[in-house]
Image (tube, helix red, strand yellow):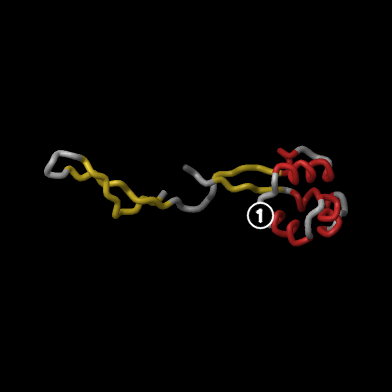
Amino acid sequence: MTELRLDNTIKKHRERLGLSQQALAEYVGVTRQAIISIEGGRQVPSTSLALLFSHILGCSVENLFTLFPSQGLEARIAPERITTESGCDEVYGDRVLLG
């Protein structure tokens, strides 16, 4: 499964309205540090907080948040099928698939 990355435009919309991080934090009921983490993409807000951002910033949730496939590499064990003497297939993994 592909990892998804959540990007946001909260900072852009906050600055458009001339709001400081502290003011936005007070409006939505979180700390300034939480706003910093959310704007930086290190924290994902709850649904209710995302809806509050949408209301305060005057735009839709879809305009604030966008999902993108992760740009990083995906690594997993490559399965290797080995048929045992009893005729059963067993799956082992000691090689790595990158993609």
Left or right: residue 8 versus residue 87 is: right
- Residue 54 in which image quadrant: top right
Q: Residue furthest bottom?
A: 33
Q: Residue at x 47, y 42 (%)?
A: 1
Q: Residue furthest front?
A: 86
Name the secondary structure under disc 1: loop
Q: Position of residue 46 (x, y in %)?
A: 70, 46
Determine crowd level at label 1: few under 14, some 14-19, many 20+ residues with C-alpha closer than 10 A.
few
The front one of 68 and 48 is 48
Left or right: residue 3 versus residue 36 is: left
Q: Position of residue 47 (x, y in %)?
A: 70, 42
Give the total of numbered labels: 1
Q: Residue at x 46, y 52 (%)?
A: 73
- Mark 1: which amino acid? Gln
Q: Position of residue 98 (x, y in %)?
A: 39, 51
Q: Residue at x 13, y 41 (%)?
A: 86
Q: Residue furthest left?
A: 85
- Residue 68 in which image quadrant: top right
Q: Residue at x 84, y 45 (%)?
A: 56
Above or below, comparing residue 84 to residue 39 in the picture = above
The front one of 20 and 22 is 22
Q: Which residue is mark 1?
A: 43
Left or right: residue 71 versus residue 31 is: left
